[in-house]
Image (spheres, rainbow, N blue to C red):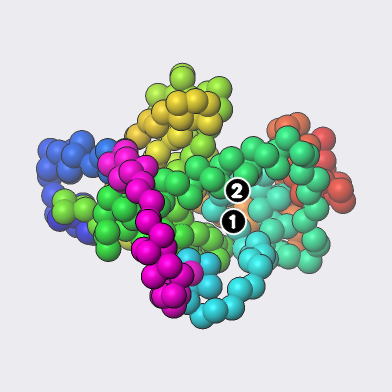
Amino acid sequence: MIKSIADLQTMSAEEIEAVRKSINLRGYYYAGVKKMGQQEGMNLDEYNQWKALPATNTCRTCKGTGKFKKPERSVGTIHASSAHSCVRRLYYDVEGSERPRNTISAELQITFAMGHAIHDVVQKALHTALPGEFEDELHVDLDEAFVCGSHTDGVANLSQARVLLEIKSIGKEFDTLTKPKPEHLIQAVAIYARALDVPFISFLYVSKSWPHSVKEFVVTYDEIHFTRWWKKKGALVEAAIESGQPPIADATKEDCAACPYSYFCPQKI
């Protein structure tokens, strides 16, 4: 079993490729979701017995404490999901003195809700197909990348390897997608896998359109993803934090339009 990034160094390229090709979280997803879809109701006696039982399942949100606090996006950190963004935005995220402001349209709120629902179904399916061998929403800290308080979609402990899961819901691009998007490689390989020491990464792209088909791309951890990101983004943020001078923006017009700091940034397009 290839459990860690260090394990990759002890294996031949042929052995690593054989393991990579054997990873099939897409298959586990379909197996789990099929089992989840098989339902049978209770009769009246069974239902009355069920009502009398105390609650025993652990809440996924409060972890069984019985208390809930609405989560807030972490402050003073780079968020892995936006690590590809404008370097000046990343600086503002880490520096943390100004509040980020977003206006989320009704259409985008529905899009986000669909994405959350898809993530929930996939995670539950993998719990069903891999009982005790799948963990979701793992906490991610990577101090060297200014990342604190991020969360990855999950890690599966398969017989042959540990595999990091990254779920992406996707629209009209689904049909033409042939490999993971560059920004997703930064998020999942350069940051999540590095932080959690996971040697393989499975990207599950789920179509938002019926019949919600799934594509899987499995990649082997490669430090080059972090090295490139650090040279282009991380090192500039580090230098700016040390000097107290924000870096020069490298955003596109579209990036600027969606940036939560555009309301005060002097370099907005």
Q: Quadrant of the N terminus?
A: bottom left
Specify whether 196 is left or right of 61: left
The residue furthest bottom is 65
| Type of the residue with mark 1 | His
User: Residue placed farthest to the front in the image?
Assistant: 44
Towards the viewer: 40 or 174: 40
The one of 123 and 40 positioned closer to us in this rendering = 40
Q: What element carries label 1?
A: loop
For the residues labelled 1 and 2, say whether their Cβ atoms are less than 8 Å apart: yes
Residue to which mark 1 is pinned:
79
Does 70 sit left or right of 118 as displayed?
A: right
Return the residue at label 2.
82
Magenta highlight on residue 76: no
243, 205: nearer the viewer: 205
- Residue at x 67% of width, y 39% of height: 110
| Residue 213 appears left or right of 235 | left
The residues colored magenta run 30-59
In the image, residue 31 lies in the stretch drawn in magenta: yes
For the question of whether residue 163 can be seen, the reply is no
The percent position of residue 95, horizontal first and vertical second, equals 71, 64
